[in-house]
Image: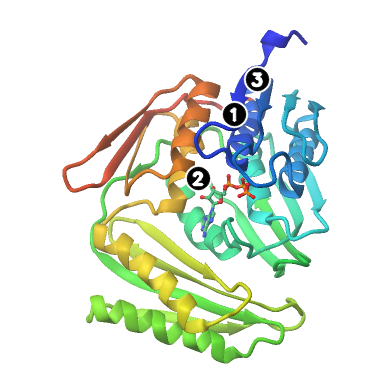
Amino acid sequence: MDANDFVEIDGSYLEGGGQALRNALSLSCILGKPVRVVKIRANRPNPGLSHQHLHGLDLLRDITNADVVGNVLLSTKVEFTPRTILDNTYRVDTRTAASITLIYQMALPVLLFAGRSSRLIVSGGTNVAFAPPVEYMQQVLLPNLKRFGAGFELKVQQYGFYPRGKGTCQLDVQPVAKLNAGQFMDFGRINLVSGVGFCAGRLPVNIAIDMQQTAQREIHRLWPEQECTIETVKHSPEKTRDNGAGILMTANTTGGVVLGASALGKKRIDGHVLGSEASCQLAEYMRKEICVDDYMQDQLIIYMALAVGRSRMRTGRLTKHTRTAIHVAEQMTGVKFDVTVEPGGQTLVTCEGLGQLNKLI
Ligand SMILES: Nc1ncnc2c1ncn2[C@@H]1O[C@H](COP(=O)(O)OP(=O)(O)OP(=O)(O)O)[C@@H](O)[C@H]1O
């Protein structure tokens, strides 16, 4: 392959993390365009491919029967030439606490453009730092993705936490003929605030109850009339024997908006602190009446770029991750994103999508 046949993506641009690599590779697979990603994760303390990125890369190689150069740990440059998209059952065992949801983030858009349904069983971490908790993928990403006419089924077989991982999830993906333009513009009124606080291993259920009480108190302090139901769960030993704790809260509105906010227990776990972190974050989104939360922003960009028609999202200030995702999507697809800050401080992001059709169904 001629050096000029690759689209080159600079992985150090803006955020300089793994997301530029993930988005560039997913789009390469869907568009059938060879890509070269250089300076991978240059702004991270441990640059280059980590386990999560490497397993995701090798998975996409298998899904697309691609030629790959640079698929070794810590590699800072990768060349990837996809051939097709093969529906199948795929298994990945990271043997670490590498984020399962970030591996899914890479493969999901690709499998939506396969000929038939696929299953993806991945072992690693379900709830790890700097990645979507598995509950967020189920309760926030899924309803947001449905706005594009796409979906998935995600089951947790085992939960996995840092440092051992050992979680396992099963993702089933039905392909789509195309993605519809997603509209995230109408906040409406809040009609449901809910959540789940969990703990596992040797951590007592009281930790989850502390999360629940603090989170509910915070929501009621700001919205005294608002019902807020937080479930508390102690994961059974069959689901995991390791210690872990966290909370996911969601707000649903009459405009179909689903916002999520989470917190994850680290070394010293205090349920009240976790409950407060998640509820304050969610309350801020609710107060601003945005339609897409800070983490969903960057995750929707790839779908907006591929959709048929003009997608629109009303969100908060753009994160660096989102600006990076826009940059990568524009380079890979040639589409143009428009970003305007509205008088109320909300940001409006719109994009006339590429109109990518699934050629395999
Ligand atoms: N708490 C969270 N809830 C939902 N999504 C999250 C959360 N934290 C991070 N994410 C998402 O995870 C992704 C992280 O991307 P990033 O590029 O930082 O990862 P990475 O580079 O692979 O990891 P690293 O930070 O190890 O380099 C983004 O899509 C971000 O929106």
CA gap, disc 1 to disc 3?
A: 15 Å
To which quarter of the image does residue 17 belong? top right
The amino acid beneath tag 1 is Asn
Q: Which label sits in the foreground, 1 or 3?
A: 3
Which residue does the numbered mark 2 point to in the structure image? 299
Q: Position of residue 338 (x, y in %)?
A: 33, 29
Q: Quadrant of the N terminus?
A: top right
The amino acid beneath tag 2 is Gln
Residue 314 versus residue 335 in the image, above or below: below
For label 1, the SS is: loop
Choose between 78 and 111: the one closer to the eye. Answer: 78
Q: Residues within 10 Å of mark 3 (few under 14, many from 20)?
A: some
Which residue does the numbered mark 1 point to in the structure image? 358
Q: Position of residue 344 (x, y in %)?
A: 18, 48
CA gap, disc 3 to disc 2?
A: 21 Å
x 78%, y 66%: residue: 166
Q: Residue furthest left?
A: 343
**Do the residues bearing badges 2 and 1 touch, measured as CB atoms within 8 Å?**
no
Choose between 173 and 62: the one closer to the eye. Answer: 62
To which quarter of the image does residue 53 belong? top right
The amino acid beneath tag 3 is Lys
Which residue does the numbered mark 3 point to in the structure image? 33
